[in-house]
Amino acid sequence: MKLYEIYFSPTGGTKKAADILAEAWMEESGQTVRIDLITDKRCPSEYQFEAEDICIMAVPAYGGRVPRPALDKLRQMKGNGAKAILMAVYGNRAIDDTMLELKDILCEAGFVSVAGISAVAEHSIVREFAAGRPDEEDREELCGFVKAIKTKLESGGKSAADIPGNRPYREFGGVGMIPKANDYCNECGICACNCPVQAISKDNLKGADESKCISCMRCIAVCPKRARLIDGAMVEGTRAKIGKFCAERKNNELFL
Ligand SMILES: Cc1cc2nc3c(=O)[nH]c(=O)nc-3n(C[C@H](O)[C@H](O)[C@H](O)COP(=O)(O)O)c2cc1C
C-alpha cells in the first residue's frame, strides 16, 4: 500500500488540509508520495496506481465546482481500482457540487471513492473569511475522520461513499477577477512561472490573459513585492454578496 497526497492548491489552503490528513494517516511512520498538480511536470497519464493504494485527492471549491485545470489532470490518471479519499476544501461558504464532480471524474478514471471530506480553509479571495483555518480545532476533527475511514476499510468496507451534491452541477463561469500588477512590480516573473494556466506572458508581466486566468489568486500569493492585486471594489462586492453565508464557523464533514 502506498499513500498518495494529490492536490491542486493555488494559495496553499487545500494543501494544508491535505497535509493534516496525510500526516494523521501515516502516524509519523511511512512515506507519503506528494503530487502537486500545479508544479508537477509529468503527464498525469504516467501515474499508474494499484488497488491497494490510498489516494487523498484534494481540490478547492471554485463556485461550488472543481477547478477546471485540476479536472483536466485528474481525468487522465489511471486509478486501476485505487481507493480515493476525496477532499473538497472551501472558504466557509459551501462546497455545493465540488465533491460530487470530483467523485464522478475519479470514477471515470478508475478510482473508488471510499470517503469524502469537506474541509474549511481561509477564503483565498476574501481572506477574513475562515482566516487562519485550518486551525487546531480543524486538525483534531480531521484526525478523527482518519480513524473513522480506517475503521471502515479495516472492517472490509470498500463501497463507494455517499457524496453530497447535485447533477447537473452548479453553473460556474468564473468570478471575473483578474489580478493586475501595480507600480511596485519589478517584472521579476515569479508570477508568470507560478501561474497554473500560463495566463501571464513573459512579454507582458504586468498584465494577464483574461481568457486564461481562473482567478485562483496564486500570482498574488507568490509575489514577493505584493505588487499583484485584484480590484478592491470587486473584493468588496464579493464580501457583501457572500458575507452572510460565510459569517458563522462551519465544521468539516465526513461522508462514508
Ligand atoms: C475563484 C474562486 C472561487 C471560490 N469559490 C468558493 C466557493 O464556491 N465556496 C467557498 O466556500 N469558497 C470558495 N472559494 C474559496 C476557496 O475554495 C478556498 O479559499 C480554498 O481554500 C482555496 O484553496 P487554496 O488555498 O488551496 O488555493 C473560492 C476561491 C476562488 C479563488
Image: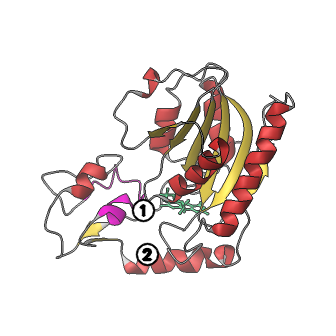
75 left or right of 212 in image:
right
Task: Indicate if the residue with disc 2 has its beta carbon within 8 Å of ligand 1.
Answer: no
The residue that disc 2 covers is: 234
**Magenta stretch: residue 38 in it?**
no
Spot occupied by residue 198 in the image (x, y as percentages of width and height):
29, 46
In the picture shown, does residue 226 fall above or below 153? below
Q: Position of residue 228 (x, y in %)?
A: 28, 69
| Mark 1 residue type | Gly
How far apart are the two marked residues, 1 and 2, measured between alpha carbons? 9 Å
Q: Earlier in the sequence, mark 1 or mark 2?
A: 1
- Say which of 170 and 140 sits in front: 140
- Scheme of image coloration: secondary structure
Residue 176, numbered circle: 1
- The answer to whether marks 1 and 2 mark residues whose Cβ atoms lie closer than 8 Å is yes
Residue 73 position, x and y percent, is 46, 34
Residue visible at 52% across and 40% down in the picture: 6
Which secondary structure, mark 2?
helix
- Picture residue at 15% right of the left edge, 57% below the top: 204
